Image (cartoon, helix red, strand yellow):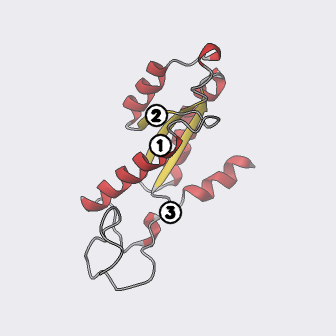
Amino acid sequence: MFRSITRSYYRGAAGALLVYDITRRETFDHLASWLEDARQHADSNITIMLIGNKSDLTKKRVVSTEEGEQFAKENGLIFMEVSAKNAENVEDAFIKTAEAIYKKIKHGEIDMLNETHGIKIGYGEPLMGRVPSVFGGSCCT
């Protein structure tokens, strides 16, 4: 049941966070099936960030940083370790994911005019083929 619900979230997503618990090996061992699920049901251009959570629990660690890095490298994912408890690297994980998505937009890999790619421009002036300035820019003219 849970997996069928999550599949609906993949549709139209520009990015996804794949999270495992560094203190529970089984969460790492299930990454391959979750990644396959995401790739099967999401757009081929989806940006996926692999996150090892609970980096604050170093003494309870059973999944090494190197294992996470290797899985990410083998599967073309971005990788970070975070501590949700201490808020360490949590914001950075979202920022890096957003930056990777933005880079795909700038390189024309994501069509901003096609809302099925998970990015909605919002209200305002029509873009007419231009890429909006998502990061930076000024608030006032």
**Labels 3, 1: front one:** 1
> Residue 54 versus residue 17: which sits nearer the camera?
54
- Mark with earlier residue (3, 2): 3
Packing grade of label 2 (10 A; few <14, some 14-19, many >=20) is many
Q: Quadrant of the C terminus?
A: bottom left
Cα distance between the residues tagged 3 and 1: 20 Å
Asked if residue 45 can be seen in this view, the reply is: no
> Residue 40 versus residue 35: which sits nearer the camera?
35
- Mark with earlier residue (1, 2): 2
Which residue corresponds to mark 1? Answer: 93
- How far from the left and from the top, in percent, is residue 67? 47, 20
- How far from the left and from the top, in percent, is residue 31? 56, 33
Circle 1: residue type: Ala
Cα distance between the residues tagged 1 and 2: 7 Å
Which residue corresponds to mark 2? Answer: 80
Q: Residue 12: give its label.
A: 3
Q: Secondary structure at mark 2?
A: strand
- How far from the left and from the top, in percent, is residue 17? 53, 45
56 relative position to 4: left or right: left
Asked if residue 85 can be seen in this view, the reply is: yes
Q: Secondary structure at mark 3?
A: loop
